[in-house]
Amino acid sequence: MKVKALTGNEAVAEAMRQINPDVVAAYPITPQTELMHKFTEFVADGLVDTEMILVESEHSALSATVGASAAGARAMTATSSQGLALMWEILYIAAGLRLPIVMAVINRALSAPINIHGDHSDTMGARDSGWIQIFSENSQEAYDNTIIAVRIAEHPEILLPVMVTMDGFIISHTMERVEVLDDEVVKSFIGEYNPKYKLLDVKNPVTFGPLDLQDYYFEHKRAQAEAMENAYKLIREIDEEYYKISGRKYAYVEPYEIDDAETVLISLGSTAGTIKDVVDELRLRGMKVGALKIRVYRPFPRDEVKEYLSNASVVGVMDRSIAFGSVCGPVCLDVKAVLQGTKMANLPVVNYIYGLGGRDISPKDIEKIFFELEKVKITGEVPNLPRYVGVRGEEDYVGEKKGFKIKN
Amino acid sequence: MANLKELSQREVKFTAGHRACAGCLPAVALRQVTLSVNYPCVVGFATGCMEVVSTIFPYTAWKVPYIHVAFENVAAVMSGVESAYKALKKKGKIDEEIKIIAFGGDGGTYDIGFQALSGMAERGHDVLYICYNNEAYMNTGIQRSSATPFAAQTSTTPVGAVEFGKKQFPKDLTQIMAAHGIPYVAQASVHNWKDLNMKVEKALSIKGPKFINILAPCTLGWRYPAEKGIEIAKLAVETCVWPLYEVENGKYKINYKPREKKPVVEWLKLQGRFSHLFKPENQHLIDEIQKEVDRRWTRLLELAGA
Ligand SMILES: Cc1ncc(C[n+]2csc(CCOP(=O)(O)OP(=O)(O)O)c2C)c(N)n1
Ligand code: SF4
Ligand SMILES: [Mg+2]
């Protein structure tokens, strides 16, 4: 084990170096670029055996990754934002073909207006595409999740592609302390990739991607849903194995000061770190607040969310994207759905939409959210529409209206 | 080069029993191409008629490894397969020599798949790309593509009171692929199995990206009786609408020069999609077609130094 100072992008590149994939196909987009610069340096220095395909688009990046994976190779890619949007068609195909591809997604806002900074709109647009989605709070998690993802994807009872995400710039470009495993440890953890069916097994020819109509398509999709269920059961075992080699324990969700918390704030990604700080502050002031970070977002950790909310009196859910026309943000929708039909069905849940286009979310903002939730707890008045945090023209919890004036 | 007897005795890679129309010449092209591949191979397909007719779960007409992913990306998918092959070979996980072959219709090649094809060619993947050109989007109901001939009637270029069919001449994709500077580019036709077989064999003996564009008439889209397909394909070559030629390392070679170049109307008149051209007021359209065919043929002769 070595300790290194790495940005999120470098941490994932380092994980990829150790994974040493057979094939990587990628196309540049900010903020993913640095990851690929780093990885192509490893290729140039002969530190990996990877066949690097520098394709002409993200559509082709994922298509080539699909081809390589179906051929029998361990294949990876990485992208952000518009790149992920351009891959959309092939995302569903990668999952439908049950190909264990691992892709780093460096979260960035979606156009229009064009914006290169971090929010979750890109990944949320792919949340039902059949990919497993794992969110990382910091560089360490991005590194660990990337290695773990290989095992999840390739598990014979799962065989689904995995997206490992981190917030663009906030994590991807921030230098942090990262504990890096020894190459040999990673190598033996991920093992050799030896899929049951591969195109290049010319002695046992198989047909990938046949036409599949009313008589069978549904069964195949049903089986795919089952694979996601299997992932829900099995990811914990792989996390446990990873704990044994790394000493770092991961779970689907990470509770923080939640045992006696009356007010719980749920989030994904880097914001979870800020929330934990604010929880510490407020705890010092005697408030019974806690936090729940969702790490595995797909499959959604339904039992864990229910379990950790069972003592809460009020819940806030942070969404770093808008589900236009829906009743709330995507994470909130999932949280509300799992509470339905339980004794927590009437638990007040308030949705906070924040941080779009990389807008900073400060400890002060989060403090305000906790205070508003306290108010909701006391008054029982639950806002039924999402609250927009830190945006001009929105009333915040004390009823101040922030000015519309844009100062240069 | 294999002779007919040898070819007929080879193990069939693309079997009978698929669901192509009677008289479908793209299906014949597939059979001829795959018979010419005397190696283990992996085949990739773009969405389109031949993809749709050759598989339907739980059946497949493919006796060799086959993959279909989407409409516009077969060149990218096979770039990935080829890279996987290189990686696994390097690791000693594969030892046999395997040929990687991508197939796309004209829609999947000239239009929506063009970017991926251009990328594959530029990057230099060792892949043989075959376009079976039936000159329209047949699978979705005969819409125009950029390979559709001038004045042809399709579902999206119908003939009406003020329209005469497709307004543009087809894009010359073979030339565009030659301009990529890849080692081998050729044009072939389904009626000349010998020439096609020679081209596939030659292409597979060359390392790097190869492109063969095969004219393959479609009974439904071109509107002719099923048994006329081969004759029509032959006429396309005899009229110089579709010359047979190769570009090997930049060097042009015309494989067949008609002793007597036939007028284009001979080709047009056998196809329902051009029937409206035979109204007297449309004679000028036929003249325009003839002019363009002549222009392209002359240019090809120049390129070939012939
Ligand atoms: C992205 C996308 N757009 C459109 C389609 C619909 N589509 C399927 S096949 C096809 C036409 C295929 O034409 P071509 O490549 O010429 O092959 P053909 O059917 O003529 O053999 C179209 C438009 C699709 N499958 N995917
Ligand atoms: S529509 Fe044309 S290309 Fe398609 S199967 Fe029928 S004859 Fe062949
Ligand atoms: Mg076509």
Image (tube, helix red, strand yellow):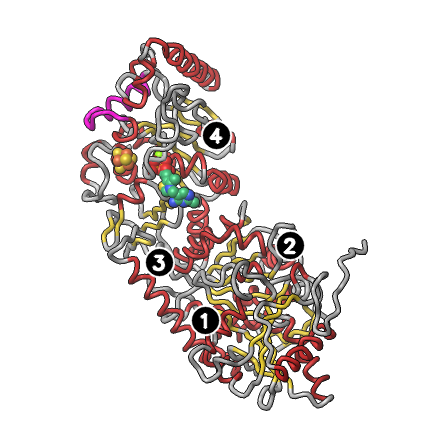
Which of these two is toward me, A208 or A200? A208
x, y percent for residue B47? 36, 44
Q: CA distance from mark 1 to mark 4?
A: 48 Å
| Residue B178 badge | 4
Q: CA distance from mark 2 to mark 3?
A: 33 Å
Magenta span of residues: B223-238
- Quadrant in the picture for residue B187: top left
Question: Mark 2 vs mark 3: which is more N-terminal?
Answer: 2
Q: From the viewer's perspective, is the residue at label 1 or at label 4 nearer?
A: 1
B224 within the magenta span: yes
Residue type at mark 4: give it: Ala
Residue picked out by circle 2: A30
x, y percent for residue A295? 54, 74
Residue type at mark 2: give it: Thr
Q: Are marks 2 and 3 in contact (CB under 8 Å)?
A: no
x, y percent for residue A116? 66, 55
Residue picked out by circle 1: A299
Q: CA distance from mark 2 to mark 1?
A: 27 Å
Residue type at mark 1: give it: Pro
Q: Residue at x 55, y 49 (%)?
A: A54
Q: CA distance from mark 1 to mark 3?
A: 26 Å
- Give above or below for B122 relative to A147: above
x, y percent for residue A16? 56, 64
Image quadrant of ligand 3? top left
Dot 4 falls on a residue whose secondary structure is helix
Q: Residue at x 78, y 56 (%)?
A: A405
Residue type at mark 3: give it: Lys
Dot 3 falls on a residue whose secondary structure is loop
Chain holding disc 1: A
